[in-house]
């Protein structure tokens, strides 16, 4: 089978983010000797060459369907600080590496563990749903607060009566949120794609609020999505049994099949969300013409660092 | 250049996002349209001779530009060489649109940008970093600065 080398070298040399790079020792199968190579991890592809500045790419390893193993698991055989990439499919080779020290080894193991496309797809799907949920919650809170303030002047008796009911109704409107939580062990292998589906109440404690918005004032500019309906299919009683979350693939299905469904499902959402976000961003940029876009973004995200 | 061919071939056999027979033409002068089974798996486009087990080749769908050439035809250009395109002829207009969509969304970089967007937004809306629960908040690949150009300057994958 032919792999189009130019496309790979182009990907390597372009401006997309490098996820990790550095020297590692790679074992040569035939001679069982270790050779120092410069590795660059981008996305789900691991590139290697002799030196960083080299034009000549020695090889690539596509990181799908393989697990990362620390060599301690093999009973201490091989050099210290070594690890390997083992393919899930039987009979396929393992790539053996050794790092200079523990820190380097750990860094690479972690980076390779989260490198697969499938893993990223599951994450994006999960976060996509959390995002939709967060937006719905915000809209709900906003609606609640505006309803409460609307009756403050006590003009319309009928209206005033309705509001407490609305609030109470809101307390019971907990959205069941299925969160994909990979099992603790599963995060440690690249091949893991069987998420445990656990149903959780979303934002339970914080949102029994009496309509006081807990979100920054800036968020108030956002309008609730037009399709949001107070009564929707996902509403369940507070103490009722968790209904099967129809959209999420259940445990036990072929993880690859699940991924395909998840990917397809959120692909559409992602595109819509992204378009809306791009529009808002553009508007924001027009408003903040003096301010550097990146700087602005960084200020908001100090907590990450 | 070495690559893990067996693993890639194994990957090509796995359930795919999208697979169909279509007319495919290479980017070089003199390339003609040939009937191929085209299969999209993760961010690779594999193409087979119909009824063959092993793909002829694999195209990595990163840093590429997908465009609609006509109602039934789309193209993929790599390497910023807009003139050199792979041409794909679909059966229907719908199919053509679906393929374009799928290929764009298959790119790892596209997904990374979305992840960072969601992470940022969820944090803004809830005050929480959604990646903390997975213990991966510090991974370079998920950092906001990684996916810079939130207003994508390189629209090559769009």
Image (spheres, grey):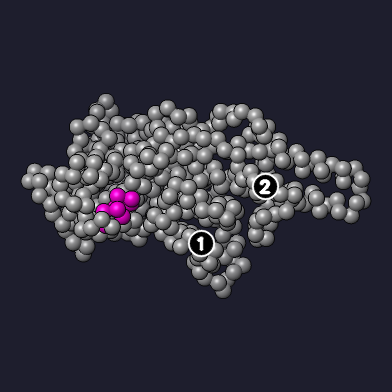
Q: Kindly give the residue lying farthest to the top in the view shown.
A: B51
Task: Tell me the magenta residue range.
Answer: A104-111
Q: Circle 1 — which element?
A: helix
Position of A199 with respect to A236 (left or right) is: left
- The residue identified by callout 2 is A207
Q: Chain of mark 2?
A: A
Q: Chain of mark 1?
A: A
The residue under the point 63% across, 34% down is: A234
Q: Within 10 Å of the Cα at label 1, are there few (<14), some (14-19), or many (20+) other Cα atoms? A: few
Q: Within 10 Å of the Cα at label 2, are there few (<14), some (14-19), or many (20+) other Cα atoms? A: some
| Residue B100 percent location from the top left of the image | 43, 42
Q: Which mark is residue A303?
A: 1
Q: Main secondary structure of the magenta part?
A: helix
- Does residue A153 show up magenta in the picture? no
Between A27 and A258, the one lying in front of the other is A27
Q: Kindly give the residue lying farthest to the front in the view shown.
A: A75
Residue A21 in which image quadrant? bottom left
The residue under the point 20% across, 58% down is: A100
């Amino acid at each position: 089978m032919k792999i189009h080398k130019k496309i790979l070298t182009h990907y390597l040399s372009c401006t997309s983010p490098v996820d990790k790079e550095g020297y590692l020792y790679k074992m040569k199968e035939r001679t069982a000797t270790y050779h120092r190579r410069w590795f660059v991890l981008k996305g789900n592809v691991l590139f290697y060459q002799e030196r960083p500045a080299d034009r000549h790419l020695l090889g690539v390893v596509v990181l799908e369907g393989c697990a990362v193993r620390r060599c301690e698991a093999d009973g201490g055989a091989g050099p210290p600080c070594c690890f390997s990439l083992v393919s899930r499919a039987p009979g396929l080779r393992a790539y053996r590496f050794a790092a200079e020290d523990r820190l380097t080894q750990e860094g690479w193991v972690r980076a390779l563990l989260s490198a697969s496309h499938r893993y990223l797809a599951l994450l994006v799907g999960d976060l996509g749903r959390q995002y939709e949920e967060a937006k719905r919650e915000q809209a709900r809170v906003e609606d609640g607060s505006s309803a409460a303030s609307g009756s403050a002047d006590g003009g319309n008796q009928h209206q005033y009566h309705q509001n407490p009911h609305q609030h109470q109704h809101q307390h019971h409107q907990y959205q069941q949120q299925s969160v994909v939580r990979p099992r603790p062990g599963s995060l440690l292998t690249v091949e893991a794609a069987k998420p445990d589906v656990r149903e959780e109440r979303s934002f339970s404690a914080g949102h029994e609020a009496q309509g006081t918005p807990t979100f920054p004032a800036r968020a108030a500019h956002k309008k609730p999505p037009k399709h949001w309906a107070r009564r929707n299919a996902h509403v369940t009683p507070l103490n009722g049994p968790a209904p099967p979350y129809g959209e999420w693939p259940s445990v036990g299905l072929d993880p690859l099949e699940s991924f395909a469904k998840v990917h397809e499902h959120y692909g559409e959402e992602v595109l819509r969300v992204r378009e809306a976000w791009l529009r808002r961003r553009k508007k924001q940029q027009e408003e903040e013409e003096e301010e550097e876009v990146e700087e602005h973004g960084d200020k908001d995200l100090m907590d990450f660092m | 250049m070495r690559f893990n061919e067996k693993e890639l071939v194994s990957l090509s056999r796995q359930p795919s996002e999208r697979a169909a027979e279509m007319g495919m033409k290479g980017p070089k002068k003199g390339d003609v349209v040939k009937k191929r089974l085209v299969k999209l798996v993760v961010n690779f486009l594999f193409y087979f001779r119909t009824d063959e087990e092993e793909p002829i080749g694999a195209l990595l769908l990163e840093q590429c530009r997908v465009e609609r050439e006509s109602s039934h035809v789309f193209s993929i250009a790599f390497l910023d060489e807009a003139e050199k395109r792979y041409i794909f002829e679909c059966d229907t207009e719908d199919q053509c649109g679906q393929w374009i969509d799928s290929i764009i969304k298959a790119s790892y970089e596209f997904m990374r940008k979305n992840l960072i967007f969601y992470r940022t937004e969820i944090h803004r809306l809830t005050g929480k970093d959604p990646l903390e629960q997975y213990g991966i908040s510090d991974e370079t690949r998920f950092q906001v600065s990684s996916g810079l150009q939130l207003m994508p300057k390189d629209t090559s994958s769009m």
